[in-house]
Amino acid sequence: MADPRIIIVGAGPAGTRAAEVLVAAGLRPTVVDEGSRSGGQIYRRPPPNFTRSHDALYGTEAAKARAVHAAFDALGDRITYRPETLAWAIKDDRLHALKGSRSEALAYDALLLAPGATDRVMPLPGWTRPGCYSLGAAQIALKAQGCAIGERVVFLGTGPLLYLVAYQYMRAGHAPAAVLDTSSYGQQLSGLALMAARPGQLLKGVRLLRALRRGGVPVLRNVEPLEVLGDAHGVDGVRFRDADGSERRLACTAVGMGYHLRAESQLADLAGCEFRFDPAVQQWLPQTDAMGRSSRANVYLAGDGARLLGADAAETAGRLAACAMLADLGHRQDARTVARLQRAMKRHARFAEGVARAFPWPHALAAELPDATLVCRCEAITAGELRASVTALGAPEVNRAKAFSRVGMGRCQGRFCGLASQEIVAAACKGRVEAAGRLRGQAPVKPLPIALLGEDGRG
Amino acid sequence: MTIDGACVEVLEGDTVLTALMMHRGFAGHSPFGDGRRAGFCMMGACQDCWVWTGEGDRLRACSSPIQDGMDIRTEAPKGLWPIPG
């Protein structure tokens, strides 16, 4: 195909490396980026007038951040870059993209989706209070705004990000009051053998834990979070059960919470891609082959939006998916390069399996949530109302429960309640979570202005 | 810029959400009456930090950089919403 129209959604590590490979093959992709500068969330760049160095901003990941930013910047005008642009729908091989109040339908011959991930969260009584943020938010506050989410912060949840953010706060002179991890020490040890697939990364984790201990940051494992305490004005503490089963309270003015990541998979859903349940991470993810081809002929997937393997794997996956697209467009690919990238992906997958084992999603907590807990932040729907949609109204799966209760129907489109609501519905049905199904993606994937202007400038 | 009518000093490069948290401690109110909200994800995903401008426009605070002379409101300006029929 001469001059194929190629669109990449996302300009994080996956989107950047994909664009680089396509440009090297002489093609000119359009990169649609919701951010105002490339980097994605993991390598998010501060506003242009901020002067802190890569080392100060990204710590141990500074070299990678610098490389990804430089790679994107080097593409210059060999790509069509559309920053501050929201990809909000996909239909009939057209991507609907919004900038400001103007939307355009961009036709494509091949589409590469690299939309990344958000925090996976488990609701908790009090989690809507001002001062309670996701772990990702706590990190963004530091990276992109140079501030902490509060004076005295407790980090709560599980996963590598829990410790990384705690460490970054400590380094920034804001040692957290405590790190509360729902995973046990035993679970963390059980992931070690698999995580050894990437010894350097594992060592970094060990060093980070040691630094937190030396810095005097209390790390408690095997905790059960019970409540974010406070009043209408904000947070003043957390209540939890410790490893011995005793209920405890800790004073703090802010909470950062998260349980590893959740794939941003709505666009793949709207493109008509098949999904499968991944038991290791307990999520429905779009299906791909070893190259990143989806079940749709001209749609390719890379990065955490497809498989939750982290930022390094996202770079590899971006390159691989671009190679697959090039091969399908009739460009010869070097078999050895592809084989090398695929071997790297296998190492990343093994490491990620170890992470999932070491820091499991505490799905059983969903069944324990008090009925009064707000599950859906957008529409203020409680766990009790969601359970009633199953027990009293007979919803057998999450989409029906959504229709009855409105959980997942709000403006975040189920990003922050979806996974927990699957667990709550599954527990109420006394079934497995995969049987509760997954919330289907709906356009628009984010809110649009009512006064939307079309391509012709009309509303 | 002003927040709920009060003049505040902010830093170039701050988001509207950062300005709100520094000076007001929250971003808005849950439309369902369950209290104040202040955003949650800071990456434009949770939609929990929509605020108003004095002209009645809506902004997502975490993804809007502040601009000189901005007039930000944590509640809808009077007379603008609901739109009189």
Image: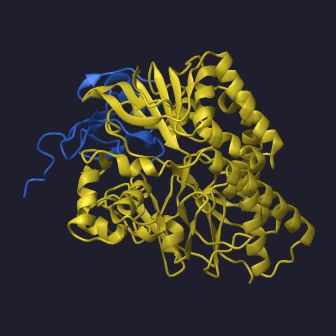
Chain colours: A yellow, B blue
Locate residue A152, reporting x and y percent: 46, 19
From the top left corner, tell me how far across and down residue B18 is, in percent: 42, 30
Is A176 in front, or is B37? A176
- Observer-nearest of A21 and A60: A60
**Image point (57%, 58%), residue name:** A115
Q: Is residue A197 above or below residue A264?
A: above
State the residue at coordinates (88%, 62%): A340
Give how far across and how far down residue A222 sits, in percent.
53, 36
Please, is residue A214 above or below residue A114 in the view? above
Using residue B82 as the reference point, say whether residue A132 is left or right of it. Answer: right
Relative placement, left or right, of A391 versus A60 is: left
Quadrant placement of the C terminus of chain A: bottom left
Residue under the image location 85 percent in, 67 percent down:
A338
Residue A12 appears at what percent x and percent y? 64, 51
Q: Is residue A50 visible?
A: no
Q: Looking at the figure, which quarter contains the N terminus of chain A?
A: bottom right
Q: Residue furthest right?
A: A336
Q: Quadrant of residue A221?
A: top right
Residue at horizontal 69%, vertical 45%? A190
Front-most of residues A72 and A104: A72
* Image: A112 above or below A131: below
Furthest toward the left, the residue is: B85
Quarter-wise, where is residue A253 in the image? top left
Residue B22 seen anywhere in this rendered image of the structure: yes
